[in-house]
Image: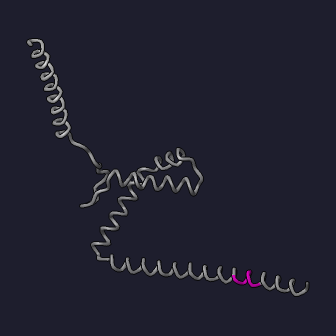
Amino acid sequence: MRFKLTSIAGALLFVLAIVIANSTRVAAQEGEVTVIDEVVAQVNDDVITLSMLKRETKERVDALKQERKMTDQQAREEVAKHQAELIATLINERLLLQKGKELDLASEIEAEVNSRMLSIAREQESTRLKNSKRQCDKVASIRLLCSRRCVRK
């Protein structure tokens, strides 16, 4: 009986030790500071974060791979060489956006962008219509040739 009691007490102490160890681990995790994003630059009341920089870097790498047919490593190295310029560009973009808001140019800029987009859409539609007409003309000439051949036979 005494052996069972000692075994049960030992088991309870073991379980208690595990619970205490896990609770201190959880408490340490709750007290730890987790960095979600880092500030790379502050532009007046705005910031440029590390995630913004990484996104822009990825876009530039993808563009170099597509346009210049570079490997991933070559494109990353090229972008890394110009990282300071990339950050300066992001800062300048933020400054321009802030100045535009300050001068209340947002509605004018939006109207200009919408006008340009409409113009581009019209140009593309015109090109599509011309291409469609050419296709129809080709089909009509093929039909005409086929019908002439059928009449000759």
User: Splitting the image into 4 quarters, where does residue 10 fall?
Assistant: top left
Q: Which quadrant of the rendered structure holds the N terminus?
A: top left
Nearer to the camera, 96 or 36 = 36
- Please tell me whether residue 29 belongs to the stretch shown in magenta: no
- Please tell me whether residue 138 belongs to the stretch shown in magenta: yes
Looking at the image, residue 140 sits to the left or right of residue 104; the answer is right
Please identify the residue farthest to the right as the structure is shown.
153
Looking at the image, residue 118 sits to the left or right of residue 11; the answer is right
Which residue is at a point 42% across and 77% down the rendered structure image? 113
Label the magenta part by its dominant secondary structure. helix
User: Splitting the image into 4 quarters, where does residue 2 fall?
Assistant: top left
Which residue is at a point 56% across and 78% down the rendered structure image? 124
Please identify the residue farthest to the front as the structure is shown.
1
Relative to 38, say whether 102 is above or below: below
- What x and y, as percent, mark residue 6? 11, 15
Stretch of the chain drawn in magenta: 136-140
Nearer to the camera, 125 or 24 = 24
User: Splitting the image into 4 quarters, where does residue 129 fall?
Assistant: bottom right
Looking at the image, residue 133 sits to the left or right of residue 64; the answer is right
Nearer to the camera, 138 or 70 = 138
- What x and y, as percent, mark residue 26? 18, 36
Q: Which quadrant of the rendered structure holds the C terminus?
A: bottom right
Which residue is at a point 51% across and 79% down the rendered structure image? 121
Relative to 17, say whether 153 is above or below: below
